[in-house]
Image: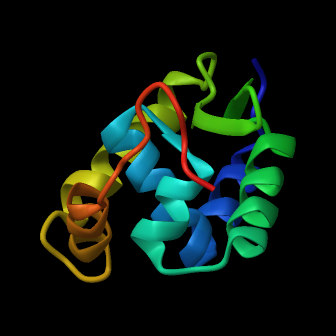
């Protein structure tokens, strides 16, 4: 997989995309509803940012019924994975990232076999 350096850093420069990527890095795979809950943003806003990340080749998605789940692209280059790992380690405990993780952890009825709306 080829990922332009500028595409990754352009993605990381937007606060919403950065927050989504750090949650995906920590959790592996998340439904759109989990991201909207954790970030406190609307579904259209989160979906728009996830579409940009997918088009850049940074995340991939899978559909399960009506629901869409996202994860870091499995062929994300090692250097890009390392950028995300170091970034996640560097902001551990910082706001808004710690609050996002806590909100996700506290989410009632988190999706399992069936996702929320």
| Position in image of residue 33 (x %, y %) | 56, 56
Residue appearing at x 75%, y 27% in the figure: 65
Left/right of residue 108 with respect to residue 39 in the rendered view: left
Q: Nearer the viewer, residue 14 or 6?
A: 14
The answer to whether residue 9 is above or below residue 113 is below
Residue at 61 percent across and 65 percent down: it is 17
Q: Position of residue 44 (x, y in %)?
A: 78, 71
The one nearer the camera, 65 or 103, is 65
71 is higher (above) or lower (below) than 52: above
The front one of 25 and 29 is 29
Place residue 57 in its image quadrant: top right
Total marks shown come to 0
Q: Position of residue 115 (x, y in %)?
A: 54, 41
Residue 65 position (above or below residue 4): above
Please give left or right for residue 26 compared with residue 4 in the image: left
Where the C terminus falls, by quadrant? bottom right
From this viewpoint, which residue is outermost toward the right?
A: 55
Name the residue nearer the viewer: 107 or 94. Answer: 107
Q: Residue at x 33, y 56 (%)?
A: 87
Residue 95 in which image quadrant: bottom left
Point 53% across, 32% down: residue: 114
In the picture, which quadrant includes the N terminus? top right
Q: How far from the left and from the top, in percent, is residue 84? A: 42, 46
Q: Is residue 75 visible?
A: yes
């Amino acid at each position: 997989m080829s990922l332009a350096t500028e595409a990754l850093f352009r993605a990381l420069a937007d606060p919403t995309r950065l927050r989504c990527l750090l949650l995906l890095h920590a959790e592996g795979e998340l439904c759109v509803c989990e991201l909207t809950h954790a970030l406190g943003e609307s579904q259209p806003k989160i979906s728009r940012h996830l579409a940009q990340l997918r088009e850049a080749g940074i995340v991939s998605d899978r559909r399960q019924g009506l629901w869409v789940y996202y994860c870091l692209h499995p062929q994300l280059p090692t250097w890009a994975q390392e950028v995300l790992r170091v970034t996640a380690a560097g902001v551990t405990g910082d706001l808004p990232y710690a609050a996002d993780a806590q909100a996700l952890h506290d989410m009632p009825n988190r999706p399992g076999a069936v996702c929320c709306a």
